[in-house]
Each structure stands twice: as structure tokens, then as C-alpha cells.
Image (cartoon, grey):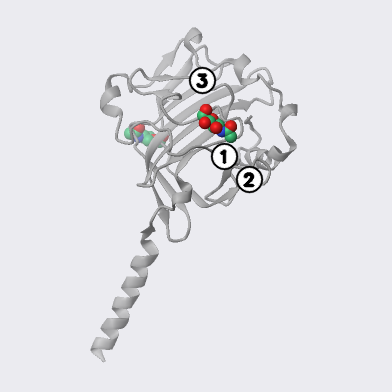
Amino acid sequence: MVSRTAALLLSGIALLQVHAQTIPIPAELVGTWNSKANSTMTGPGFYDPVNEKFTEPEHPGISYSFTADGYFEEAYYRAVANPQDPKCPKGIIQWQHGKFEKRTDGSLKLTPIKVDGRQIYSDPCAYKNSIYTRYNQSSTFKTYQVLVDPYHKIQRLNLFKFDGAPVMPLYLAMNPPTMLPTTTLNPLTTQTATPHKIKRGELPLNHEVIFKRTPGELRAAQWWWFGVFLTASGGALYFFF
Ligand SMILES: *[C@@H]1O[C@H](CO)[C@@H](O)[C@H](O)[C@H]1NC(C)=O
Ligand SMILES: *[C@@H]1O[C@H](CO)[C@@H](O)[C@H](O)[C@H]1NC(C)=O
């Protein structure tokens, strides 16, 4: 009787352990995935940690890289419209890397190396300088799908945020992925890691560049995720091209 209870207890514990476990990273996820404009891409072409410098991509967009051994890197370049004053858009560049895991419930959990992430925030009408700071933000994608895009005929990654909202579609750009070293970069950058400002002339972001294209040029197919950002940000418009 005692041993039966013990066996039940043990199997209960085993079940709990299985539930909390992570599962091997599927090969289909490995690579560098870029949003459609394909100009924002992880790796040394986006962020130079030695000189603390970003190279501004030609178009706003996002990029994720995943390795088979559980490392990720992400690159964001976005313009945020200001509905009160359309001439005053804000620009944001973000970069992070760290480890990720796939959970048994199908979700992906991304844990950045906190000291390595960087952000440039530019609000030209409010501040003369852009603001360059550390940035760290863990994220969980509830689920994801890898499929062959029926229109572009290339591998496509659909990520879904923790609440199920879709991230804009990403397309396979590189495999193996293009990434900076996956270890902590901070030892290289300790001296410059404190928040500081960048003078206007040195801005990687500016008004003209952000609005190279008008929202009217957005393809109809992009509106489904555009709407999601509109809702999620409580009225602020996020333009990705
Ligand atoms: C990570 O982000 C949080 C929230 O912004 C901040 O309080 C914390 O200092 C950051 N950590 C590092 C190491 O930058
Ligand atoms: C995206 O850019 C990369 C790097 O320049 C290139 O190798 C790849 O073919 C591009 N993908 C598409 C779909 O244009």
C-alpha cells in the first residue's frame, strides 16, 4: 500500500517535471529571419559592440536569429508616428541577444543578457539629442509556425506574442544565422555602457529617413499585423516597411 502511494507520488513528480521541461530546439527555427524589407538584420552589420555604434538599416523592420544550441539575437528598427503632430515621429533602435528555450507547451522563452542590450530613442521634436541606453526585455512567444510562404516561396516564420497576437511575418534570410558572438559582450563595452546622448549630426535615426515611404505604400497584406500594433500601443502608430 505504502509503495503504491509512493509510486503514484513519484509518477506525479515525474509528470510535473515533464511539464516544466524544455524541449530540444527544432532545426526549422535555426537561421536569421527578417521582416519583408529584409534590410534590418541581426549581426555585425546592425550593431558594432566595440565602438557602440549602430548602422541604420535602409528600412524599418525587425530581425531574429536562432541557433541550434539555444542562442538568439534580435534587431529592431522602428518608427513611431505621432498622431498629434505627424511631423514629429519618434525612432527606436533596439538590439539584444541571449539564450532561448522551447517549452513543452510550444512557447519560446527569450532571456537576454541584461548588460548587453542597447536602445537608441530619437524624438527629434522633443529632444535635440537621441538617447542611447542599455536595454533588456525578456519575451515569451506563445507559439510559432514555420511554413513555406505561398506567395514568396521562401521559408516564413510566424511568431505569436504571449497573448497570441501575431508579430509581422519573418522570412528566412540566412542559414546558418548571421549573429554577433553569443557570449557576453559587455566586457568590451563597460566604459561606454552608461546612458549617454548622441549629438544630432551623429544620429543613426532621423526624421527624413524614417518617413522615406508613406503609410499608403504599405501593402494590403500588411494591415493585419499593423492593426495589432495599433491596438496594443493604445493609439500610437507603428510603421514597419
Ligand atoms: C534591465 O531593465 C530594467 C527595467 O528597465 C532595469 O531596471 C534594469 O536596471 C536593467 N538591467 C540592466 C543590467 O541593465
Ligand atoms: C535578404 O538579405 C540577405 C542578405 O543580404 C540575402 O542573402 C537574402 O537572399 C535576402 N532574402 C530575400 C528574400 O531577399
**Cα gap from disc 1 to disc 2, whole angstroms:** 8 Å
Q: What residue is shown with label 2? A: 149
**Cα gap from disc 3 to disc 2, whole angstroms:** 28 Å
Residue 155 at what x, y percent from top left? 57, 44
Quadrant of residue 224 within the rendered picture:
top right
Residue 98 at what x, y percent from top left? 36, 39
Ligand 1's image quarter is: top left
Quadrant of residue 221 within the rendered picture:
top right
- Which amino acid lies under the numbered mark 1 shown in the image of this protein? Tyr
- Which amino acid lies under the numbered mark 2 shown in the image of this protein? Asp
**Cα gap from disc 3 to disc 1, whole angstroms:** 20 Å
Residue found farthest to the front? 153
| Marking on residue 171 | 1
Query: In the structure shown, which secondary structural element does the residue marked by tag 3 occupy?
Result: loop
Quadrant containing the C terminus in the rendered view: top right
Q: What residue is shown with label 3? A: 56
